[in-house]
Image (tube, rainbow, N blue to C red):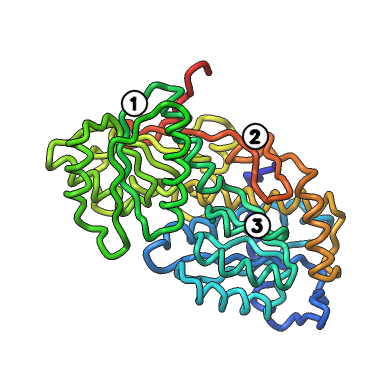
Amino acid sequence: MKMLKKAASLALASALVFSLAACGSEGGKSDSGSSDSDVFRIGGIGPTTGDNAIYGTAVKNGIQLAVDEINADGGINGYQIEYSFEDDQSDSEKAVNAYNTLKDWGMQMLVGTVTSTPCTAVVEETHADNMFQLTPSATAVESIQYDNAFRMCFSDPNQGKASADYISENGLASKIAVIYNSSDTYSSGIYQRFVEEAESVGLEIVAAEAFTADSKTDFSVQLQKAKDSGAELVFLPIYYQEASLILAQADKMGFAPAWFGCDGMDGLLALDGFDASLAEGLMFLTPFTADAEDEETQTFVADFEEAFGDTPNQFAADAYDCIYVIKAAAEKAELTPDMDISEMCDAMKAAMTEITIDGLTGKQITWGEDGEPSKQPTVVVVEGGAYKVLQAEGE
């Protein structure tokens, strides 16, 4: 993967992308779904407003940075990328509307959607159209249930299994409580696989307490049951907003177990008004941390901060990787922009199972025909108000 450091190159590429986007809806498409332009049109969908805007905005910007770099470096197979992103507010109906808007614009490949439930709705549309889809962060199994769809992140079940394995292999605890959102596919999917794996590796689930979207502000009952059960660690397969409340309420009641979460925890330290000291020692699975010391990560972080004035999270990194994955697969498949969308998708399906990627979110990443990536999970811990990568035992 190549990152360009020269601001002038990025500015030039950005100007080209946005000038193309301005006339994209007028470029036209033939009835067969092929573009009459000489650029690849890549669309993105995710929440840039609403409760999950931190995720969608990061994805939008991560894609933009990669597009700018690739365009400045000659594009894909010698063709530039035209990019357009639509807000779905993490809502399925709005996501489908966004997909149709991007189709009218001339989209040939989709990066998205960002969250699972909208992605599961949109994959029905991309499957019907046989359009290539790569989601950076939708973790539900159903989100890539068809052969035209792939993902950059771990699935919910894979996160549940990896979490139980890490806790067991590193001796973090033997008595585990779980607090999860039974009305959310992300949370319940991780929970179910975690419980199965915990049993197989000898972890004892001493409490499993659910909440729903209608009861996600007061966690006193769930926390008291976890405390009374003697839990040494509480597993939180939930998003950072609810986690922030749980940590604050646990502190008030004097309950201080170890805490372990998944990728939905990313964003916690950036939450307005949250006391970062409450998260001290919190561990969670994530494919990326901006504090990693490798040169590739630090270059990406510096370029992202310069371009957008913000520190990238894992969603930005996943999205950035997505564009370079598309570039690698498109070059393997020898795509050209004048190809029919369905023909393009069929070529990408085959190429995805033949490429190996070194990205920000993993090294030597490969994909199976089921669309799932194969890569090693990373665990971080909050120390001193920042994330630090944890090494597993024996590393």
Q: Secondary structure at mark 2?
A: strand
- Where is residue 356 shown, x and y percent of the image? 74, 39
Type of amino acid at the residue the image marks with label 2 = Lys
Using the image, determine if residue 259 lies above or below residue 52: above
- Where is residue 165 shown, x and y percent of the image? 48, 30
Answer yes or no: is residue 12 visible.
Answer: no
Q: Secondary structure at mark 1?
A: loop
Chain-order first, disc 2 or disc 1: 1
Report the residue that reaches farthest toward the left: 253
Foreground pick, 316 / 151:
151
Which of label 2 and label 1 is nearer to you?
Answer: 1
Q: CA distance from mark 2 to mark 1?
A: 31 Å
Disc 2 and disc 1 in contact, CB within 8 angstroms:
no
Which of label 3 and label 2 is nearer to you?
Answer: 3
The residue carrying pointer 3 sits among few (fewer than 14), some (14 to 19) or many (20 or more) residues within 10 Å by Cα, namely many
Report the residue marked by disc 3.
134
Report the residue marked by disc 1.
174
Type of amino acid at the residue the image marks with label 1 = Ser
Report the residue marked by disc 2.
363
Chain-order first, disc 3 or disc 1: 3
What residue is shown at x 34% (from left), y 26% (from top)? 174
